[in-house]
Image (cartoon, helix red, strand yellow):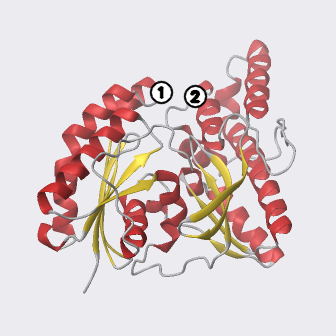
Amino acid sequence: MSTIILGIESSCDDTSAAIIRDEWLLSNLISTQKVHEEYGGVVPELASRAHQVNIIPVVDRAIKQANITIEDISAVAFTRGPGLLGSLLVGSSFAKGFALAQDIPLIEVNHLHGHILSHFIKTSAHGKHPNYPFLCLLVSGGHTQLVLVESYKKMSIVGKTIDDAAGEAFDKCAKVMGLGYPGGPVVDKLAVKGNKDAFEFAKPLPHGLDFSFSGLKTSFLYFLRDQLKDSPNFVEENKEDLCASLQHTIVTILMDKLVNASRKYGIKEIAIAGGVAANSALRSAILETGKKLGWNTYIPELEFTTDNAAMIAIVGYFKYLEKDFAGHDLIPQARLPF
């Protein structure tokens, strides 16, 4: 008998619902909130209100697109954290109500585990996944981590940022250039046309496998300030080269640590995950480095790099097989431990 999992993701500003049958993706719907763009970042109160409006229509469409009925669903998995508390409350409350109404199990999922295990989602175009143990470079707007993954439930952080995340560095530098929010995709698009060697920025390399992006961000800001004193149009005239140099610096920092981690642990199964995993330069660097060092590399499909419910559903599927269910007294946590 098939196991069908409904996944609910509402950790930030995207409301998502997905249906998975035995690891195979049947549907993955995402409703993106555009209201935050004018503020240059996510406004928590607006995000939670939008989730309340979107969640029922998104779930309904996901079920219909999967061509199943509500009665076919074996369990509902939801993001418990980390994330914005108000947003998490909407998703968790809906999941609890749905599970109660259908008398099916409730499964809690760590959002970060979802990103890492998104590689195990099967689609018609993708069925390849890492072999355990593997190293995963998890990079997003809020997190930059190197994770040693020994099984779906045994993961350990071996390196992390000591200040800003990589995605945060992209967004903040893009903001001061007037490129809008989110900045990462815009920087990536402009960088393709620029010269990565045009400018040089700081590359903080803290001890061990940890990352740091605060120094890079600061050096970038001071560099722009100095240039704008003499040339008010400096950013507009050089934005493609600025983006290319910035992106190259960030990717170099990430890759240096990933190579060191691979050598330290003797692991050549290498994966990336998270929103920054959509960056074209990072994806190319992983593939090129993998060929040189004999890695087996795993890059997620673009739809699984951003926050999505398919990754929540796949973790829910693995937990369902072991009957790892949650109680209805469980509360979401904005800072859920890894």
Residue 217 in view here: yes
Under circle 1, the secondary element is loop
Q: Residue at x 25, y 44 (%)?
A: 93
Compared with residue 90, is residue 40 higher up or lower down, i.e. above or below? above
| Mark sitting on residue 251 | none
Residue 69 in view here: no
Compared with residue 324, is residue 78 higher up or lower down, i.e. above or below? above
Figure quadrant of residue 281? bottom right
Figure quadrant of residue 83? top left
* Residue corresponding to mark 2: 175
Left or right: 264, with 119 as reference point: right
Q: Position of residue 172 (x, y in %)?
A: 61, 30
| Mark sitting on residue 40 | 1
In the depicted view, which residue is nearer to us: 113 or 36?
A: 113
Q: Where is residue 131 in the image (x, y as percent from the top left)?
A: 62, 79
Under circle 2, the secondary element is helix
In the depicted view, which residue is nearer to us: 193 or 286?
A: 286
Quarter in which the N terminus is drawn: bottom left
Say what amino acid the circle numbered 2 marks: Lys
- The reply to whether the C-beta atoms of the residues labelled 2 and 1 are less than 8 Å apart is yes
Tell which residue pokes out farthest to the top in this image.
229
Tell which residue pokes out farthest to the bottom in this image.
1
Whichever of callouts 2 and 1 sits on the residue coming sooner in the sequence is 1
The span from disc 2 to disc 1 (Cα, nearest Å) is: 7 Å
